[in-house]
Amino acid sequence: MNISELRGKKVLIVGMGIEGKATLRYLRHHIPDSTVTPVDQTDGADYLDNQREYDIAIKSPSVKKELLRIPYTTATNIFFANTRGMTIGVTGTKGKSTTASLIFAILQAAGKRAHLVGNIGNPMLLELLSEQGPKDIYVCELSSYQLEDIAYSPHIAVMVSFFPEHMDHHGSVDAYWEAKKRIALFLKQEDYLVYNPAFRQLAELAAQTVAHAVPYVETLPCGEKEVPLLGKHNRDNVRAAATVGEILEIPRDTAAAAIRSFRPLPHRIECVGTYKDIRFYDDAISTTPESAIVAIVALENVGTIFLGGQDRGYDFSELVSLIDRSPIKNIVFFPDSGEKIETLLKEKSRKRYRTLRTKDMREAVQFAFDTTTPGAICLLSTASPSYSVWKNFEEKGTLFATYVKELGK
């Protein structure tokens, strides 16, 4: 929605998180004479009772659209309707933050006017408060929440992975996929869809798009050992970013230099350090069984793992099978899904484990120091969301690192 369409209207901003606050600032700058009212669930259970007094709502990503009974748009739609530069949108169940950051690093190395925005923590509309022009390139990390009601596609859409997540918001795997694939729904013939051909759904979508469908490049711009990120999944993320670099005709040596100097994002198989001859890795971003599997495979020598969190009904069978085949001997189970994983392990596994049930991160880390074999790895990769115990994955990962360093002295 073009900002001019909001002039003279009574606008209701629904949700006052980081994006809602950015939207309020953007609207007050561009349409100062319009009535703009922010509301949030912290205002009480009746915070939407007066919504019919407004012409239009601007919905924050976490707000379910079923709560709105008036026309609405989103900050994401306002961004895409009003930006003058090139847009590169990145989505996927896992890997989108790293891939978006890699693309941004390559663009910066090439001297481009690049901006990293979106779900990664920098609201898109804040960037539009600065002077912009056709040479600006916006790399946008886009979540399924932001995509489920999007009415635009970026000039280059990048899809890195797909497996079940966010069932509590979308209701089903099919609805989650419908949200994700909207990133490509409005692509034009001159646009691009960059995709990981290892995922069946992405390959099928690529076969249907009117845009240029481009699978990941097969070779990295630099040697595999030069990539400062662990695991095959991260080499795929590098390939995704390198593919975008090739579309934009960025020299391979420039892309290679950016990749070599890239540093892993926090809480993504991040090495906390070695203490008492035990290596500790923080993979707090892991909120699904698939992402925990990726971390275990990437690190190989995991002796202790922390599992569990909010129970969203995931199937942990494949994860349990991998643990049974792995060197893992010690497991911490956090509520609520930890109990479910433990029960499945007892039913399926041929091994016996030393285990701890707790919601106390300090107790969990002490258990790791007491039980992990010297030379092995302790991995925080819970395969479940954090919300049953912690505010978010950042809090979980920060507590883990804090107690590792404290108890490791």
Image (tube, rainbow, N blue to C red):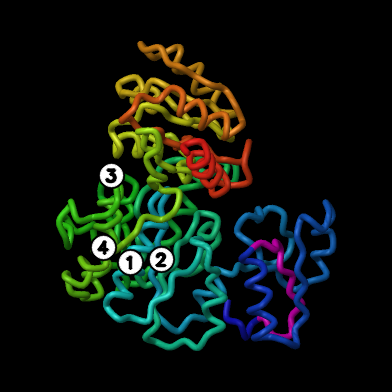
Residue 393 lies in the magenta stretch: no
**Which residue is under mark 1?**
103
**Which residue is under mark 2?**
89
x, y percent for residue 385 = 54, 40
Of mark 2 and mark 1, the one earlier in the sequence is 2
Q: Nearer the viewer, residue 2 or 258?
A: 258
Q: Amino acid at mark 3?
A: Gly
Q: Nearer the viewer, mark 3 or mark 2?
A: 3
x, y percent for residue 236 = 27, 52
Q: Amino acid at mark 2?
A: Gly
Q: Amino acid at mark 4?
A: Ile
Q: Which mark is residue 231?
A: 3
Q: Is residue 24 left or right of residue 167?
A: right
**Disc 1 and disc 3: Cα gap in Å?**
18 Å
Q: Quadrant of the N terminus?
A: bottom right
**Disc 3 and disc 4: Cα gap in Å?**
15 Å
Of mark 3 and mark 2, the one earlier in the sequence is 2
Of mark 1 and mark 3, the one earlier in the sequence is 1
**Which residue is under mark 4?**
259
Q: Residues within 10 Å of mark 4 (few under 14, many from 20)?
A: many
Q: Nearer the viewer, mark 1 or mark 3?
A: 3
In what element is the residue under mark 1? helix
Residue range of the region highlighted in magenta in the rendering: 6-17
Asked whether disc 2 touches disc 1, contact meaning CB atoms under 8 Å apart, the reply is no
Seen at 35% across and 24% down, the residue is 373
Q: Amino acid at mark 1?
A: Ile
